[in-house]
Image (cartoon, rainbow, N blue to C red):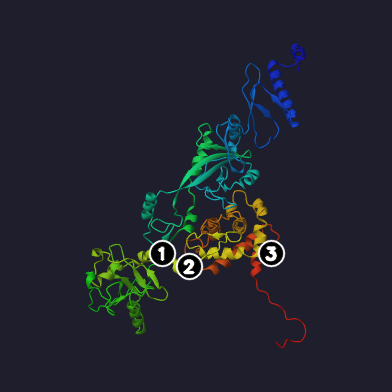
Amino acid sequence: LSSGIRERVMARRVISPLVWVQFRCLVCIAYLTLSGLVGASLELGHDRVLPFWRPAPAILPTCRLHALRGGAAQTERSAVSSTPENVAMAGEGGWMVLDKLDDAILARVRAGLPKIKQPQWNDRVRKVECVLSFDTPESPNGLFVSMENFQGYGADYVNLDHTRSGNPLYLNIKWKKVPKEDDAMKTDEKEAAPTKMAIGVEGGFDVEGDKFDYEKTNYLAVMPEKVLIPLPQPELPELVSMVVEGILKASDLSTDEEQVMAWEEKRQPSKYAAGMVQLDNGKKISPDPSTWVCEDSGIKENLWLNLHDGYIGSGRPQFDGSGGTGAALKHYQAEKEKGNHFPLAVKLGTITPNGADVYSYSPEEDDMVEDPELAKHLAHWGINMMQMEKTEKTMAELQIDINMKFDFDKICEAGKTLQSLNAPGFVGLKNLGNSCYMNSVVQVLCALPEVKARYQEHAEEIFQRAPQGKAAEDLSTQMAKLAVGLLTDRYVAPVSEGGETGSYIAPSMFKFLVGKGHPEFSTGNQQDAYEYWMYLMEKLERAERVDGVPTTLTAKLFEFKVEAPPPGPPSQK
């Protein structure tokens, strides 16, 4: 508007000076917006240009309207381009790592604050594996954790979540493997030596143990511009820093998932311990281990005391010839034929004030058991449990030794030239600890063309329909994730010089989901593969009826059908 028009309007007192300033601002904004629709941009006296249309990915738009000064509105505009001043490096997959935090990016971050929140104690933070793929923080672009729903996404799927949720802010977590030094590795191996038959718990076997440390780097990822801001960054809003801290401190596994991943040998109290019949035959056992001897063979090792009648016999022979003659078991069987049921025996060399190894030979137990009244039962034979010291390895220690030292090359194809099969369809499944039953079932399923057609070929459709923020709890989504991981080249590792490096994925999310709520499959115990197969078929059928994929239900592939005989005279065959 010309100054002449302004003077005439003001002279006629049509509007007040303040309203006039507001009117000018509205006109300017309308002009700039209309100009932007046709690709125009306006210089505002600064060294930056503000485009009002959606720019190319290399440019990030923002507009900051400052407070009125002297009745005029000052608008500062900025753009982020891949220039050396504000970009330190171009990351993989089109991601840009910023060297300097720009006002434009800061404004973009602030605009996303209403979408993010701090994780609470009951929020499941998935920061070690993508919910739609097997990408992890070790993947080239790391893992992107939504600061809205705390789900983890690989670089190929973060845009899908952004499009569906509208959330622009993610925590990008990257881990880089660094080989441990020899001295540190030896120390770690010594400290990590198992002391009990268990997997994934303190004192047990560590299935996740490796020979690497990790360099961990974190970034704030801004979508859809694919901008990475190195953390920590003091210029970021406090809420962002609090959310980042909450995600990093959150547990990787829920309590239920830790139970699925862990297994520990548990001994049940024997039903024959309470009210045990002990013969009063005048027999007393010396507390001196040097006087203990098998009553059948004279062996002085691996001796078992029958708690019912005081008989001392050697244990069963092992595959390598050690162990004994099995006199303790033979004695139980002989007494049973006479009508005496004396199933409980204690290994003499393992007695300590804290307990001992007790075995039940009864067919319905036939396992290591607990005797809650062991001190009383030993005292009957003259043994003061509180004064005893361990002189032999427990059964758990012997099993640990076998697992640690057994030469598996004897039963494998060691020394033979083998051809590497690193290819789609030949991707392995990592043993998560007693998970071989599940791995076998999954490998058989994914080898079927019909399963491949349903889950691998329709994977993107299934991912698009996955429940927002709950993809890890949707069985069809997790089956599609498995199919893509096993049947495509996404996780096919390059063959090493020796051809020993195999391709594999770790189906921990799938294992937990299927086993959730089941008394057996929700644990880390060994299970029957056929029972798991039947249980999985039931769950898949329920999930597939509502997943929208127009193919045959997986369970229908295994139904039996009765064929009617062809018409005509009966066959002579």
Query: Residue drawn 57% across and 63% down?
Result: 442
Q: Secondary structure at mark 3?
A: loop
Residue 125, numbered label? none
Query: Residue drawn 75% across and 31% down?
Result: 37
In the foreground, 377 or 480: 480
Asked where in the image residue 475 lies, by quadrant, the reply is: bottom right
Residue on which the image places disc 2: 412
Residue 99 seen: yes
Q: Give the residue type at disc 2.
A: Cys
Precedes in sequence: disc 2 or disc 1: 1
Query: Residue drawn 40% across and 48% down?
Result: 181
Residue 403, numbered label? 1
In the foreground, 530 or 372: 530
Q: x and y percent of residue 324 in the render?
A: 33, 75
Of badges 2 and 1, nearer the viewer stands 2
Q: Give the residue type at disc 3.
A: Thr
> Label 3: few (<14), some or many (≥20) within 10 Å?
some
